[in-house]
Amino acid sequence: MQNEYLDFYKDKIILVTGGAGAIGSNLCSALADNGAKLVLILDDLSAGYSWNIPKKKNIMFVQGSVTDDIALKRVFFEQPQIVFHLAAFFANQNSVDYPEKDLNVNGVGTLKLLEYATLARITKFVYASSGCSIYGSAAPLPLKEEFMSMNLTTPYQVTKMLGELYCNFFYNHYKLPVVKTRFFNSYGPGEVPGQYRNVIPNFIYWAMQGQALPITGTGEETRDFTYVGDLVDGLLGAGCRENIAGQEFNLASGKETKIIDLANMVNTAVGNKAGIKFGIKRKWDTKSRLLASIDKAHNLIGYQPKVEFKEGLLNAVQWFKDNWQVIQKSASFGPGISSAVRDK
């Protein structure tokens, strides 16, 4: 965590939706360790796990959905001052399979949370959007915040855009101090593999079981992988900086990594001899490259990613080894759904 953030969060009450997930649990741990009076977690455990929630005396977990008024009233009764809205119906393929659930959670859920935050006079509302989603496939690289596309290819992309538009409305109409952060291909300790999860935890999971790693496409496709600790720093910066309300920021590494290089690195780190197998590219996956500009985030919220990809990947592998038994029990790859690469 950046030093200038440490004092800001002391003695504050903070709500984190989706706090049982990989990014959320790391964010809650950082907030709790640096003096927050109370960190409220609202999570329905549809994609998170109770064992992944930090066990700290100033963290309170409420199991419930952002679409549930009873759960929302419960957490807002504690009078949070800051909201980090990370909860989402994740992600692309999941939304293709279940578009109505995606709209309910990412659309209605975000709208409800913004309404409660406005009534509670929240001092900062940080929304977790998806840079991999809202720019579309025609945006020039590196992706910059001012470019947005209406030509989107999954319901998840549509509803992440919808969330940003609702944030704009509440900022413009009610002066709610919202900040939109756009994540890119997050990875690191805390993320459990599964049929709709990100590519890196799935690769590590399959490699540790001695399976060939599936690549949909040629493997020359690139992604901007961002370590969870760097994302937490970016979120903390967005939550504490003044005079940035209404703005949007890419939170990324600012570097490209080829999927085939990723697969080889995972196999090497785990000692998997099964290699790689290639499959048909998914219909909605129209981006052959992803690379974000992080200049705006650096200039306005002090964002500066510190963890090199190889170091972050080894940290993720070690987390898998340390938690292998519970990960094996939690990982779920349902029948009838392709176990191809899942990425955000």
Image (cartoon, rainbow, N blue to C red):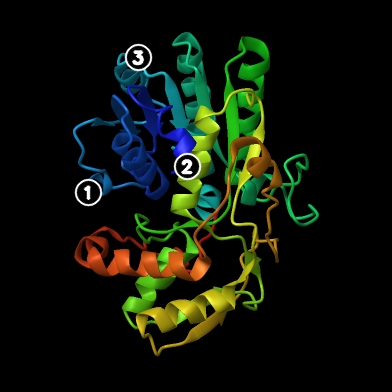
Instruction: Determine whether the residue tagged by mark 3 lies in a helix, strand or loop.
Output: loop
Count every numbered label the image shows and give the total: 3
First reached walking from the N terminus: tag 2 or tag 1: 2
Measured Cα–Cα span from mark 2 to mark 1: 27 Å
Q: Residues within 10 Å of mark 2 (few under 14, many from 20)?
A: few
Residue annotated with mark 1: 51
Query: Which is nearer the N-term, disc 3 or disc 1?
Result: 1
In this view of the protein, can residue 22 be seen by the observer?
Answer: yes
Side of 4 relative to 194 (left or right): right
Q: Nearer the viewer, mark 2 or mark 1?
A: 2
Which of marks 2 and 3 precedes in the sequence?
2
Q: Quadrant of residue 138?
A: bottom right
The residue shown at (43%, 83%) is 268
Q: Give the secondary structure at mark 2.
A: loop
Q: Position of residue 319 (x, y in %)?
A: 30, 63
The residue under the point 36% across, 22% down is: 12
Residue underneath mark 3: 79
Q: Say whether marks 2 and 1 touch (CB < 8 Å).
A: no
Q: Nearer the viewer, mark 3 or mark 1?
A: 3
Please tell me the numbered disc located at residue 40. Answer: none
User: Within the image, what quadrant is residue 190 found in?
Assistant: bottom left
Mark 1, Cα crowd under 10 Å, few <14 / some 14-19 / many 20+, is few
State the residue position of label 2: 2
| Tag in front: 3 or 2 | 2
The kind of residue tagged 3 is: Gln
Dot 3 crowding, Cα within 10 Å, few <14, some 14–19, many 20+: some
Which residue in the rendered view is the most extreme toward the front?
A: 3
Disc 2 marks which amino acid? Gln
Identified by mark 1, the residue type is Trp
Q: Residue at x 59, y 29 (%)?
A: 179
- Residue visible at 53% across and 59% down in the picture: 343
Q: What is the CA distance from the residue labelled 3 to the residue labelled 2?
A: 26 Å
